Image (tube, coloured by chain):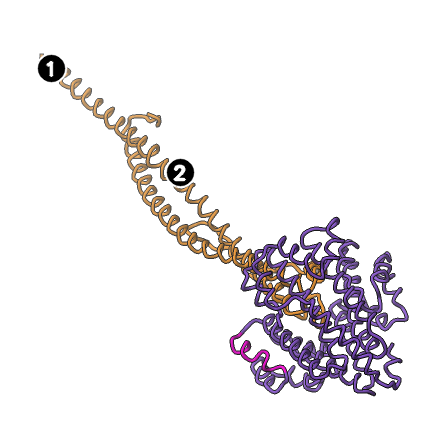
Amino acid sequence: MVSILRRLRRTKVRDYAYISARVRVMRRSLIPADEYRKLLNMEFNEIIRYLEETQYKKEIDELTHKYSGVRLLEYALNMNLCATYNKLVRISSGIPRALVTEYLRKWDVQNIKSIIRGKLFGFPDEEIKESFVGAGEYKYEDLVALLSRDTVEDVINALQGTPYHEILKEVGTKPLSEIEDELDKLYYTRLLDIRPESEDVRYLLEFIRMEVDLKNIKTILRLKVEDGTYDEIMKSIIPGGYQISVDEARKLANMSWDEVMRGLESYWFWDAISEKVKEGAPLSILEVYLDKYWCNTVISKSNHYPLSILPVLAYIILKKVETDNLRIIARGKLEGVPKEAIEEQLVIV
Amino acid sequence: MAIDVKPTRSELIKLKRRIKLSEKGYELLKMKRDGLIMEFSETLSMARGVLEKLRESYENAEQKISIAKAIDGTIMVRSAALAAKSEPEFELRSKNIMGVVVPVVKRKRVRKKLSEREYGIIGTTARIDEATSAYEELIDAILEAAEIETTLLRLLEEIERTKRRVNALEFKVIPEMKEAKKYIEFALQEMERDNIIRLKKIKAKAEA
């Protein structure tokens, strides 16, 4: 897939026009912002009934005979997310398809992490399967086949020849947290490794680099709050950020918390969190505001460049945000979390 | 009369001494009982705060973990919990409250640093950090509640024991001793009167 991207290719405008138009239609099926207020006032069973009137109907109907409660919701949301992303790949062609496929490989990393963690900690296979989103190179059946291996070593051996194997063979000798971070870094470095030989790829790379910025700043803030050392921070920094490169990260890693806050004022995402930082909001809230800002940034960019990969990437992000929001509301309702506490965790754009 | 005594002067002297000692002990035990009750009331109002804090910590932890499960996934959250290999460390000492030995739980650092927790940072969010911190605070609250509940229980036991001793002294031991003292005094007076009459008779006979 990467070799296709590396080859010089004439950008086919019709490829982008078609997929952008399809994605514009698909976006209309996303839950509107004002509907979340209604969902916040519903009980869990009412939320399920509401979702049965939406694009989630198929998955809920399929699973309702076997699952109930939060497991039904989780599984249905994951299945729908997977089906939606696979549809995006199916309806796109040429360079857009290649770019989308590359971007969705993040789900391979996520699924492999779930399998390794699940096996190491003895989770039932059924529960691990429910977390699968087979939207990357490994589809649901591939993941189930991987999961069916007896031991973690068998799973790792089955991934021989893939880029993940080099990292995963350290399972047991390195902490699992380090291995997971390495897998995430591998995903981003592989993407950023693509040479920007055409405009469309440049859009993707800029998008990825900004996403890397957000990952890096969240890592730095989380570790700073916990008095993380310079080495601990730098171990988790993804190279290739838009503004938060490795060198920038080194500077931030050496600063105190207050110095970091002052240092952030020059970054592109500062407006998103400046007020909340002054209020002393907890990190999870800062993350919510960063995610909201990211969604709005991507939407704005996709409106500026409608004949590019950006509308598709915007939709991918908005779809994920929607499923996360639904999960937060449903779990929050089940656990009796106050409405205000649920609402402040939602990314509503 | 429960106390079996010989009606002699020496017994009377011994008994008087015992009564004095018992009355003194009774006063001291009453003071101890009252002091323990005061300590118990103070500890009880502290306990209300501690138990309220425990309830709030529990609710907060449950809420945080449900949000973390929604975003970071059940497998990540549950396995992060299972991966926590070390147990909370604490030092158990004791202190003395009016003769009652109560525990003092000296909590060592329960909080793990983010880098010590068993989950990758890049692929997770701050929600799982906050859930982990909330549960670590809950452990602190549980240890504090355990200390104060044990203190209350021990104080209560000691108050009961002291009350029983006070009541025993007030309604049984001292009254019985006083009864015995009355008996001895009466018996001695009787003997005195007997002696006087005997002497009068002897004198009358001697004069006759």
Residue at (23, 25) in percent of width and height? B186
Residue at (76, 76) in percent of width and height? A20
Above/below status of A31 relative to B23: below
Inspect this view and state whether residue B155 appears: yes
Label of residue A160 in the image: none
Q: Nearer the viewer, residue A171 or A95?
A: A95
Type of the residue with mark 1:
Ala
Q: Nearer the viewer, residue B168 or A241?
A: A241
Asked which secondary structure carries label 2, the reply is helix
Q: Colour of chain B?
A: orange
Label of residue B204 in the image: 1
Q: Chain of mark 1?
A: B
Asked which secondary structure carries label 1, the reply is helix
Q: Position of B122 compared to B108: left or right?
A: right
Residue A299 image point, x, y percent: 67, 78
Residue at (71, 80) in percent of width and height? A302
Q: Quadrant of residue A236?
A: bottom right
Type of the residue with mark 2:
Arg
Residue B102 image point, x, y percent: 49, 52
Mark 1: few/some/many CA within 10 Å (<14, 14-19, 20+): few
Above/below status of A139 relative to A3: above
For the image, the number of numbered tags is 2
Majority SS type along the magenta span: helix
Q: Which residues are magenta?
A: A269-280
Q: Chain of mark 2?
A: B
Above/below status of A270 relative to A45: below
Label of residue B164 in the image: 2
Inspect this view and state whether residue A173 appears: no
Q: Is residue A272 magenta?
A: yes
Gap in angstroms between the C-alphas marked 1 and 2: 58 Å
Residue A131 image point, x, y percent: 75, 60
Q: Which chain is purple?
A: A
